[in-house]
Image (spheres, rainbow, N blue to C red):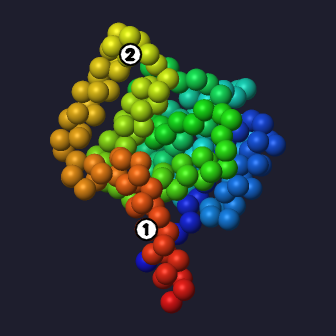
Amino acid sequence: MAREPPSVLIVEDEPDLADLYATWLAESCTVQTAYDGETALNSIDDGLDIVLLDRRMPGLSGDTILTTIRDRNLDCRIAMVTAVEPDFDIVEMGFDDYLVKPVSKDELCSIVDQLHLRSSYDDQLQEFFALASKKALLDAEKTEVERKSSREYDRLQDRLAVLRVQVDDTMQELLDQDGYRRLCQDLTRDTLLEETY
């Protein structure tokens, strides 16, 4: 059975950039845009599947919006799409993935597809993927010395190790990018076949 297209809110204070992202996603998603934090908070409700959130905005920051969404216990996936380079403070933040600008159409569409797929997982697996994404980001952005001297990074690794033991072996394979890509391709192919018949 084909999945419903996700409902995506793009929160970006540069209207041209927000509109570009919206154009990129329009074919596969239901898209809304918010050019400031206040508008974003008024647009966020239970019907929203994915939020693409800039961290640095005038007025309400993306970090504040992220905290508010999580405090409201809304069941949506959140990706930070921002020029802010990641630091160890991301470990405690409640987002699911993180893209550093500039981003390409392929990157943006891919992250939305991944987040939409993740939304069907249970809470434990969602936490596992969110933490794994943060670890991969910090591994790419921080030196080994920086990582070894960070208590937050140690806690991240410990929690990830516990979750890895709890998560089913089949789901662990999804973390492998090639396996994950193949799964997405299989889902897309199955959807196309269903629509054909």
How many residues crowd around disc 1 within 10 Å: few (fewer than 14), some, or many (20 or more)?
A: few
Q: Is residue 43 left or right of residue 188?
A: right
Residue type indicated by callout 1? Asp
Q: Position of residue 182 (x, y in %)?
A: 42, 60
Q: Earlier in the sequence, mark 2 or mark 1?
A: 2
Q: Residue furthest left?
A: 165
Which of the pair 107/71 is nearer the observer? 107
Residue type indicated by callout 2? Glu
Q: Is residue 112 left or right of residue 34?
A: left
Q: Determine the secondary structure under disc 2.
A: helix
Which of the pair 132/95 is nearer the observer? 132
Indicate the quadrant containing the N terminus: top left, top right, bottom left or bottom right: bottom left
Q: Relative to residue 121, is residue 141 depicted above or below? A: above
Q: Determine the secondary structure under disc 1.
A: helix
Q: Residue furthest front?
A: 178
Which of the pair 96/108 is nearer the observer? 108
The image quarter in which residue 135 lies: top left
Residue under numbered circle 1: 186
Which disc is residue 130 wearing? none
Which of the pair 97/110 is nearer the observer? 110
Residue drawn 49% across the image and 39% down it? 97
Q: Residue furthest right?
A: 16
Q: Relative to residue 182, is residue 160 depicted above or below? A: above
Residue under numbered circle 2: 144
Q: Is residue 169 left or right of residue 188?
A: left
Q: Position of residue 164 (x, y in %)?
A: 23, 41
Instruction: Decide if residue 165 is in sight here.
Output: yes
